Every structure is written in C-alpha cells, then in structure tokens.
Image (cartoon, rainbow, N blue to C red):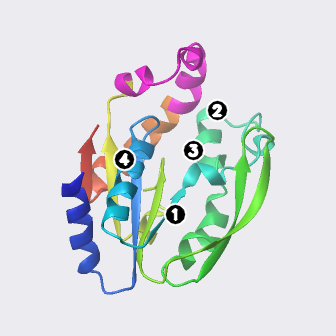
Amino acid sequence: MNFYVDVLKSMAARHDKPRFILGIDGLSRSGKTTFVKQLSAELNEESLQYHIFHIDDFIVDRKRRYDTGLEEWQEYFQLQWDVTWLSKHFFQGLPDMERVTLPYYDGATDTHETRTIQLPKEGLIIIEGVFLQRKEWKHFFDKVVYLDCPRETRFNRESNETKKNISKFKNRYWKAEDYYINQYNPREQADIVITT
C-alpha cells in the first residue's frame, strides 16, 4: 500500500490546485472499501488532509430504482443514483467549495438524512464506488484507480444468503457491469489499475 500512497502523493504534488480529486472505481466486491480503509490508514500516518465519500451513500430511495418499467440492469446503472443531481450539486463543486450538503441514504429505513460535510482546504478528496468512470462523472476526477477483479472471485466474496438470489445477479448486477465494461472500458481508461 505504501507504493500506491507514494504514487498518489506524487500525482497530487504535480497537481496545480489545492485539492486532488481521486476516484476509486471497481465493480461490486472488487475490494474498493478495503482499499480505501488501507489508504486512509496510510494517509493518517502521513498526516495528510483528506475526506472520503462512498457513492453508495447517495443512492435514491427504492421506488425510484425498482419496478420502474425498465430492465433491472438499466434500473441499477441508470437509476441507482441521481446522476445529474450529483454532477451538479456534488462533483462540480469539489475543487473549491468549503462544504457540501448531501442526502445520505439509510437502507434500513429507505430514507435520506441531510448532512453537511466540511471539506479540507487542500489535500485529497477520495470518492469510492462503482461506475465512477461513466461519462457524466469521469471528467470531474483528477485521477482514477480501477480495482480489477474477476466476476467469480467477486461473487465468492458475497454472503451465502446473498448468493442464493442468483437471478438478481444475472438480471440486475452482471448485465449492468457488462454494459459498463463494454461502453466505458474502465480498465483501459483508469490511470492506475490494481488487480485484487
């Protein structure tokens, strides 16, 4: 991990603005959250300023992403997040706004809680999530790390209970992932690729 922190620090040092916007992209269960936790620990040791956002904190309520009439994979890719709203009210202001107010999703209650986050004046803004290199968001990042992991490995990381609903994987998640890979070539477009 030290190697990646050194690479990121080097990239940020060559950056001519106070904040460096870093995307940690990867498909479901590719190890994004684990990677970000390790990166966070390293950044704390280095005493670097940073803030981490998880894109899944900003998904929309269930009625907007299930039983909409679209195919399941389209609901997941196109409706899971309000892509346009996040572009305008989150991503666009990250380089220079002092604070950001966002609707955090609670899956247990299917509701949102509004939170205002104070951003560091300089340092790293890290955004972790799936489909980050979609056309609406890719240009907001200074650099993107893509965690590349085979589907079989990722599926084996799911709980046994989750694995039982194989049709949801086939119809919702895997088709959306295939679309993302075929349309956006995330592995080729990323600045750093890490096999997990």
Report the Cα–Cα distance between label 4 and label 2: 29 Å
Q: Earlier in the sequence, mark 3 or mark 4?
A: 4
Seen at 60% across and 23% down, the residue is 168
Seen at 59% across and 48% down, the residue is 56
Q: Main secondary structure of the magenta part?
A: helix
What residue sits right under mark 4 in the picture? 35
Seen at 45% across and 45% down, the residue is 33
What residue sits right under mark 1 in the picture? 136
Q: Earlier in the sequence, mark 2 or mark 3?
A: 2
Q: Picture coordinates of residue 189 (x, y %)?
A: 30, 56
Nearer the observer: mark 3 or 4; the answer is 4
Name the element at disc 3: helix
Camera-side residue: 186 or 193? 193
Circle 3 crowding by C-alpha within 10 Å: few under 14, some 14–19, many from 20:
many
Three-letter residue code for mark 4: Phe
Q: Earlier in the sequence, mark 1 or mark 2?
A: 2
Name the element at disc 2: helix
What residue sits right under mark 3 in the picture? 77
Report if the CB atoms under discs 3 and 4 are less than 8 Å apart: no
Circle 1 crowding by C-alpha within 10 Å: few under 14, some 14–19, many from 20:
few
Three-letter residue code for mark 1: Glu
Report if the CB atoms under discs 4 and 2 are less than 8 Å apart: no
Q: Earlier in the sequence, mark 1 or mark 4?
A: 4
Q: Quadrant of the C terminus?
A: top left
Residue span colored magenta: 152-173
Q: Picture coordinates of residue 84 (x, y %)?
A: 64, 64
In the displayed structure, 118 sits above or below 183; it is below
Can residue 56 be seen in the rendering of this structure?
yes
